[in-house]
Amino acid sequence: DAGITQSPRHKVTETGTPVTLRCHQTENHRYMYWYRQDPGHGLRLIHYSYGVKDTDKGEVSDGYSVSRSKTEDFLLTLESATSSQTSVYFCAISELAGYNNEQFFGPGTRLTVL
Amino acid sequence: AQTVTQSQPEMSVQEAETVTLSCTYDTSESDYYLFWYKQPPSRQMILVIRQEAYKQQNATENRFSVNFQKAAKSFSLKISDSQLGDAAMYFCAYRIRQGAQKLVFGQGTRLTINP
């Protein structure tokens, strides 16, 4: 298995509080992604990173920010959590863009916003 | 924008039988990849099979095979000799060949295997 960990694995928080989810990889892959999974929607891309300090928005980026200060860590922040952000969040990594490289997924974080 | 549609929210099959999961997609690109991912109750995303759009030959991985119809933008997954361990959510996904590997997923199909 690819070395990807996510922390925390479960979190319950209240509306309006800030939340940070962490993705850590030991594979030294260049690309990192954050997806959210909701029933009826599959997985949707929130943000991704193509290098240290290089990030870009995905399909559902409103209300989220990301940071990548080291190759191995990619943080997802909800500045002020809302109930609509209750979801399962997946981090993924991949190596080279444009090549037939598999995207590896972390175990997921279940976030509940009350 | 690219979209992926799985029109079967749920499917069931008898153990040892064959089942086909459907997926259609919409894109204006000509060079892309298509994938099927399996998500068991553990929530882990597992790559089952991938297809490169420029290849006419359908991909096969053991009991899993695809029917790739590029003109129709259809990408179905066939599971032969279904096993209890095949029970899971299955997601169809797409990405363009170039650039960051941003995956676009379908809504998923929950597959139940009846013993």
Image (tube, rainbow, N blue to C red):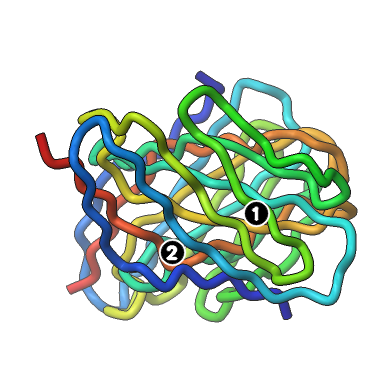
Q: Nearer the viewer, mark 1 or mark 2?
A: 2
The residue lying at 38 percent from left, 67 percent from top is: A18
**Label 2: few (<14), some (14–19) or many (≥20) C-alpha neighbours in 10 Å:** many
- Between B66 and A49, which is closer to the camera in this rendering? B66
x then y, percent, for residue A85: 36, 73
Q: Amino acid at mark 2?
A: Gly
x then y, percent, for residue A76: 52, 56
Q: Looking at the figure, which quarter contains the C terminus of chain B?
A: top left
- Which secondary structure, mark 2? strand
Q: Quadrant of residue A82?
A: bottom left
Q: Tell which circle, 1 or 2, labels the residue nearer the N-terminal end.
A: 2
- Which secondary structure, mark 1? strand
Residue beneath label 2, please? A42
x then y, percent, for residue B19: 36, 47
Q: Amino acid at mark 1?
A: Ser
Q: Quadrant of residue B80?
A: top left
**Label 1: few (<14), some (14–19) or many (≥20) C-alpha neighbours in 10 Å:** some
Separation (CA) of disc 1 from disc 2: 24 Å
The residue lying at 27 percent from left, 58 percent from top is: B11
Give the number of the disc on residue A28. none
Residue beneath label 1, please? A67
Q: Looking at the figure, which quarter contains the N terminus of chain B?
A: bottom right
The outermost residue toward the front is B17
Q: Quadrant of residue B40?
A: top left
- Which chain letter goes with mark 1? A
The residue lying at 74 percent from left, 42 percent from top is: A31
x then y, percent, for residue A25: 59, 29
Query: Left or right of A94: which side holds B29?
Result: right
Query: Left or right of B65: which side holds B107?
Result: left
The residue lying at 33 percent from left, 29 percent from top is: B81
Query: Left or right of B110: which side holds A20?
Result: right
